[in-house]
Amino acid sequence: MNAPITLTLVILLCLTSMGYSDTNIKRPNVSGQFYTADPKKLSDEIDDFLKKADLKATDKRAHVVIVPHAGYLYSGAVAAYGFKAASHNPYRTVVILAPSHYHGFDGISVWPQGGFQTPLGIVDVDQEFAQRLIQEDAKFSFSSQVFEQEHSLEVEIPFLQKIFQNFKIVPIIMGQPSFALLEKFAISLNKIIGDREDVLIVVSTDLSHYHPDSKARVMDAAAIHAIEAFDARTIWDQCQSRTVIEMCGFVPTTAALLYAQHRKFKDVEVLRYANSGDVTGDRERVVGYTSIVIYDHLSTTPSRLEDRAATQTASLDALTLLQKKRLLAIARQTMEEYVRTGKVIEFEESDARLIRDDGAFVTIHDRRKQLRGCIGNIIGRGPLYQTVRNMAMAAATQDHRFTPVRPEELNQLEVEISVLSKPREIQDIAEIVLGKHGVILSQGPLYQGVFLPQVATDTGWTKEEFLRQLSSQKAGLAPDSWKDPQTKIEIFTAEVFSENDIR
């Protein structure tokens, strides 16, 4: 009799223990929807994403990673870049900052204990860290309702499970707190982390939503530029007004940038940009994605800084004649098809030079050599051949200085392409070499202008007149704004070629 009673008690005790722990384990919301529920398939899929994320080796330690949170089909390949950049460093605590899509609330919700489950297993919550954070402010609290449907935090966890071992998470969902509360949060985060080097901040956000591809890329470039400048205030203001920038995770992004400011981080790298149209082929309503990593400091010695500056403004790896012909053909075919039918041609390229992320402008001239359209991306946000394709469409139909190109004009137009080096900020205009350097002039994300290197050659302007025209004509500022200490001036080089040159 005693044995069965003892066994029954053991079973009851186990069931009670399991029931208690179960209340602290967050079950997945979107397993089988945003990502596969099959553990083997999920593991293999993430491995494949990470393998294809082409990153150069670095000894820098990632402290903040900004990644998307859409379904893996759409954004998994982009997210892999951010996670891979952090994968070679050991972290004991990963703080995940995610937006609330379903519940509006004035505050920040911190999951305090237990763990989060995905098909790859359960990740423990760093209870001590979470409790310390909750104690910092009355609006740092826990609401289980906030987590009930949310996907933005959950989808980051399987990537973390694949690349790290022996780590815990601090799951945080942000509602609609004030900017002041986010500043308090950043201060608290900085205080709790202290001199620890084993804490990673993961920020979950997508970019613009449901705009045509060309508009989305402009909006997303503005958002990325603000992040690169650690400009938390611009992210906050512009996303609140929805005038220039859209980010569903602008609240956690703002918090992370404020934290980065307190830590005096200086080094930021945009690893990848794409949108849903790059996967689906639908360019009419796209969602933007990016992976960005923030390191603790610029890990370059002064002599290496000089080397890097020289490299960034040196000539690009020269394109071969065949590569130039291919890019011009892509631009020409794209322009003609889009102008005639409104359809976008999909191209597939394997040439390593053409799939590299380089910025590019496409310029269109008429038979009298008059400008007919010119639009470009200064920073490479995707493969070069895709940038050329997209800019060809935009130059032909979306340069608002001109009427859209008409079908009957097509055989009278000439296409010119400028492939750009990465911009480098300068402190002295003596570094500008007219005819060699293009120049970007900006005051925040709203006022920015760019002249390609060939502008100086075509106009014959002096350097001062070049900068005056850039300030007023392109950036929308006062002519002498280039002298303002608040004005940022960057230079770049370009490899320029046209259909006439090739012929």
Image (spheres, rainbow, N blue to C red):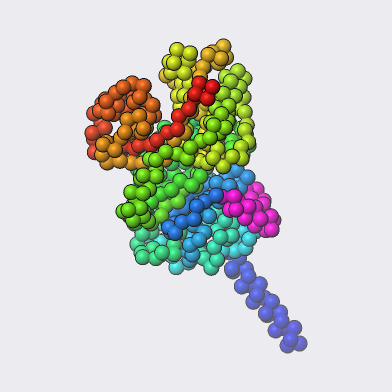
Q: Is residue 398 left or right of residue 132?
A: right
Q: Of residues 355 and 3, which is closer to you in this image?
A: 355
Q: Is residue 150 visible in this depiction of the protein? A: no
Q: Residue 142 in the image: x percent, y percent? A: 47, 58
Identify the residue at horizontal 43%, vertical 58% (top origin).
60
Is residue 47 inside the magenta stretch?
A: yes
Identify the residue at horizontal 71%, vertical 81% (top origin).
7
Q: Is residue 483 visible in this depiction of the protein? A: yes
Identify the residue at horizontal 73%, vertical 88% (top origin).
2
- Residue stretch rendered in magenta on the structure: 25-53
Q: Quadrant of the C terminus?
A: top right
Q: Among all residues in the image, which is located at the extreme right? A: 1
Is residue 339 inside the magenta stretch?
A: no
Q: Is residue 108 left or right of residue 331?
A: left
Residue 157, relative to residue 385: is it above or below? below
Q: Is residue 422 left or right of residue 500?
A: left
Identify the residue at horizontal 38%, vertical 37% (top origin).
492
